[in-house]
Amino acid sequence: MTNQMLPFHRPEITDDDVHSVVETLRSGWLTTGPKVKRFEEDFAKYLGCRHAVAVNSGTAALHLALDAIGIKEGDDVIVPTMTFAATAEVVLYFRANPVLVDCRPDTLNLDPKQIENAITPRTKAIIPVHFGGQPCDMDPILELARRYNLKVIEDAAHALPASYHGKKVGTIGDITCFSFYATKTITTGEGGMATTENPEWAKRMRMMSLHGISLDAWDRYTDKGSWYYEIIHPGYKYNLTDIAAALGIEQLKRCDRFWEARRRIASHFHEAFADLPEVGVPACMADIQHAWHLYVIQLNIGRLKINRQDFIKALKGQNIGTSVHFIPLHLHPFYRDKFSHQPENFPQASAVFERIVSLPIYPTMTEADVRDVIVAVRKLVLEYRR
Ligand SMILES: Cc1ncc(COP(=O)(O)O)c(C=O)c1O
């Protein structure tokens, strides 16, 4: 057993990251300015998308995306139940309805068949979440969107870098939203990005991210600065700082290397658990690139004398930090009570929730760390197998 706790996540912060942030601090320009512009340009180039709008969280990106496509009070927006709070709460910001949909039991992604059942005349958009970094099956989702005239806003908080049938996530749906929260595949501490091919939506998101002030007034954040500005709409305060962008620029340069490291850890885990019927490893679809933000195992509880909670506790006892992604939204008091959701309305997510454990997977893990996780999981499985 490792004698030091292996945390569930630890970001890689290099001297280049520190230098870039310090240089920005010393530049005298702290808020949105040249570093944000450069981060947006680098990000758009990296993905090959037309527009990238930097904001101060993934949640802000989702909110602005729904605003840009014109979500209104009373609209329905389809959201997976197997997601984080942010995906559904942004729908409620508009007094619109997040219509929860069950997941597939293998990838834990949205099930396109279930989406169609949830579509009503009020449905305006679908928010597929690329769970753990594995892209959803986008072809049938885009086909449904075409057929029912819906917009597709991808929640790609986990999915950098990922691709689906050769297309990078960030260039597929109408708007794609990324997160740079501390545990994500690249980080700015807090931060997010919305990408789109549509110049009108990009313009609207940019404007609404800074108080709905006309875009010309953004010049006051450049050398052309002027005191004059016009408020076009009541907007929000979602702009990213140059301090954060300075970190993002450096992290993005290492995005492919980070991915390679996570992919390697995932394949070690796959191999190490392949002979254990008690441990289901993540299913990986054909013709996709998985970002491997998360490595979620599914315990075969029927074959174990221990439940998921106790398994997590026992792993902690072995000094291995873990997490659970996610407690499905329909089980949270707010969603359960407001929408009268019952666990049996979402049979897959409700069942899967009892089995899932997210193992550590990040580039700062050493080979010994990866081995420690494998040894601890195997030890517990052998100890508690029926
Ligand atoms: C699936 C999903 N969507 C959205 C978000 C929100 O991102 P942020 O924390 O940057 O607002 C998260 C964040 O953790 C997430 O996991």
Image (cartoon, grey):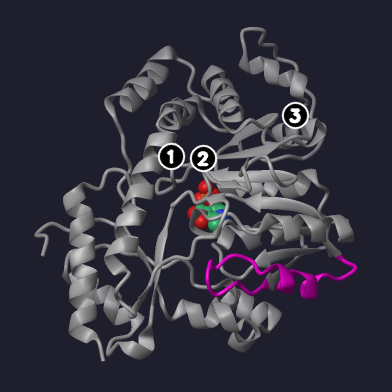
Specify the farthest residue to the right. Answer: 121
* Mark 1 vs 2: CB contact within 8 A: yes
Nearer the observer, disc 2 or disc 3? 2
Residue segment shown in magenta: 101-122
Dot 3 or dot 1, earlier in sequence? 1
Q: Secondary structure at mark 1?
A: loop
Towards the viewer: 263 or 384: 263
- Residue furthest to the top in view is 224
Label 3 sits on residue: 213
Tell me the quadrant of the picture where the N terminus can be found.
Answer: bottom left
Q: Is residue 298 left or right of residue 192?
A: left
Amino acid type at image mark 3? Ile
* Residue drawn at (38%, 82%) of the image: 300
Residue occupying image coordinates x 24% and y 79%: 381
Q: Please tell me which of labels 2 and 3 falls first in the chain.
A: 2
Mark 2, ligand 1, within 8 Å: the answer is yes
Residue at mark 1: 187
Residue 197 spot, x, y in % from top left: 75, 34
Q: Within 10 Å of the Cα at label 1, are there few (<14), some (14-19), or many (20+) other Cα atoms? A: many
Q: Is residue 321 above or below residue 155?
A: below
Residue neighbourhood size for the residue with mark 3, other residues' Cα within 10 Å, grouped as few (<14), some (14–19), many (≥20)? many
Specify the principal SS of the magenta part: loop
User: In this picture, is 295 found above or below 102?
Assistant: above
The amino acid type found where label 2 is placed reads Gly
Q: Relative to residue 310, is residue 175 drawn left or right?
A: right
> Residue tagged by mark 2?
191
Residue 331 seen anywhere in this rendered image of the structure: no
